[in-house]
Image (cartoon, rainbow, N blue to C red):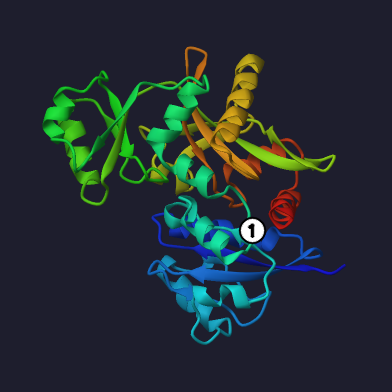
Amino acid sequence: MNRKKIALLFGGVSTEHVISIRSSYFIYKTIDRSKFQVLPIYITPNSEWIIPNRSEAVFPDPTELPENHFASAFRSQNEILPNSDKHLLPTLGVEGIFIGLHGGQGENGSIQGFLEVSGIPYTGSGVMASALAMDKLRSNQLFDRAGIPVAPFCELNKKEVDVKRSILQLPIPFPVFIKPTLGGSSVNTGPAKTPEEAIKLIEKIFVTEDRVFIQELIQGTEVSIGVLEKKVNDRWEAFPLVATEIRPKSEFFDFTAKYTKGASEEITPAQVSTEIMDKLKSYTLLCHQTLGCRGYSRTDFIIRNGIPFVLETNTLPGMTGTSLIPQQAKALGIEMTDVFSWLLEQALSA
């Protein structure tokens, strides 16, 4: 079989840089080598592209390295192209890109736009769906209009409001949950039980961000459920997986709870009724379709009094061996090797 040559983009300028490395290591090890050659391309936190001079380059195991040593290990274990940079991408002879990035420019539509302009097919959602999913305000507006339960929300813009006055006049009752409108991975997010706590967190977010998303704090059972797309009779059809229940040992499922071993308990399938599971499947599929996602996505919910309230949709969810979508796929007997093949075949057929 003539193997397709694809590139795996990972790292990136994002707070989720390290998570992208971990996910992409799993992706690199799992992609079906009988179908694909894989060229890993590392993007440093400073936006430097490090491109090996051959396919099937060495991808160092990130679990065996200190976080700040990965770049030097990747360089030392591979021959790197001279003048290595993104401008070389169209010259590499790759037929498609597997996007292993998370957050930031990798997930907000920026890298997707660059690849569109370069004429190179890529996995996952396109520019519009990526941008909408990253924007908490606009995605929640769309979910609400689609009939998916959404907790009351509003947004504050750094350039337009007085924080203290806005919080004192907030149309949402406390406690509330606050996060950057365009943020990812629960960085600088958290609950506020009082106006004073809200003002403090918002001012912290406004140091680096212009928009803050505020939502009524829904307390209940936190779950997450993925969607995959598979080719059926010459058409790519989306289908839901099963939900995972998340029990963080901290107050909420923050960055530490997400990515620290033992900081949360994840139960797949979630221990919910058949009726609730069916609702979650229906809503996650509707979120995927409403945003126009492609290939895969994962949507987070809080269940209160039997009602799943949507939180957000992730267009590039975590893909380590123990991440939620791999857990959910395993529960349904789906191999991740097949999932990655579906994503690449869909990208290459677009």
Quadrant including the N terminus: bottom right
Query: Left of 20 or right of it: where is 279?
Result: right
Disc tally is 1
Q: Position of residue 69 (x, y in %)?
A: 44, 73
Looking at the image, can residue 276 be seen?
yes
Q: Is residue 100 above or below residue 3?
A: above
Residue drawn at the location 23% of the way across and 25% of the way down: 193
Q: Which residue lies furthest to the top in this view?
A: 305
Q: Quadrant of residue 295?
A: top right
What secondary structure is found at the residue carrying circle 1? helix
Q: Residue 252 or 249: which is nearer the viewer?
A: 252
Q: Name the residue under label 1.
A: 27
Residue at (72% x, 48% y) in the render: 339
In the picture, residue 287 is in which quadrant? top right
Q: Is residue 84 above or below residue 223?
A: below
- Residue shown at 55%/77% (left/top)? 88
Q: Is residue 249 visible?
A: no
User: Residue 159 at what x, y percent from top left?
Assistant: 19, 43
Name the image quarter holding residue 180: top left
| Picture coordinates of residue 17, whole percent (x, y) | 44, 59
Instruction: Give residue 255's position: percent from left, percent from top.
Output: 40, 45
Image check: 269 left or right of 247?
A: right
Please tell me whether residue 15 is drawn above or below residue 284 in the rendered image: below
The kind of residue tagged 1 is Ile
Check the image and name the residue furthest to the right.
1
Q: In this view, does 169 lie above or below 236?
A: above
In this view, the residue in front, 102 or 94, is 94
Mark 1 crowdedness (10 Å alpha carbons): few <14, some 14-19, many ≥20: many
